Image (cartoon, helix red, strand yellow):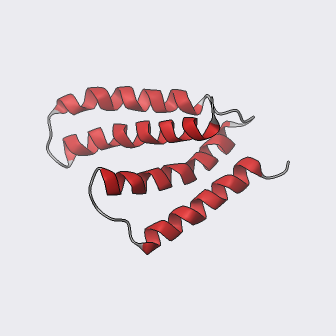
Amino acid sequence: MNLVIIYLGAALCEISGCFAFWAWLRLERSALWLAPGVVSLVLFGYLLTRVDVAFAGRAYAAYGGVYIATSLCWLFFVERIAPDRWDYLGAVVCLVGAGIILFGPR
């Protein structure tokens, strides 16, 4: 499976799973939100095992940049809040770091 698709899928699963808990505890939604949240978090964990790198820590470190960028998309599309220039700059820095971790010569 394509690395970008895996990381984006993992990020969406983690964010939506965590948001289910956020909705339950912070937005006072029904505890029924927890069931899809748990399923989403399990799928997140599974997807990260599909990344073709030799070490889990490296896969997780690189994933962090993708997670941050995807979180800002969530902020915009789901929560309807526009990221500011500092959000964008931080995401770019993180994605550059993720690229260095993944594709740096070893």
* Residue 87 % position (x, y): 44, 67
Q: Is residue 72 above or below residue 49?
A: below
Q: Is residue 32 left or right of residue 20?
A: left
Count the marks: how many? Answer: 0
In front of the other: 85 or 33: 85
Q: Is residue 18 above or below residue 82?
A: above
Residue 73: give x, y in percent of width and height: 40, 54
Give the image quarter of residue 95.
bottom right
The N terminus - image quarter: top right
Q: Residue at x 43, y 40 (%)?
A: 12
60 or 52, nearer to the observer:
52
Residue 82, relative to residue 34: is it above or below? below
Drawn side of residue 81 relative to residue 49, left or right = left
Which x, y percent locates residue 61? 62, 48
Residue at 84%, 51% in the rendered image: 105
Q: Give me the residue at 15% from left, 40% from top.
A: 29
* Farthest residue, direction right: 106
Instruction: Choose between 27 and 13: the one closer to the eye.
Output: 13
Give x and y (percent) for residue 13: 42, 36
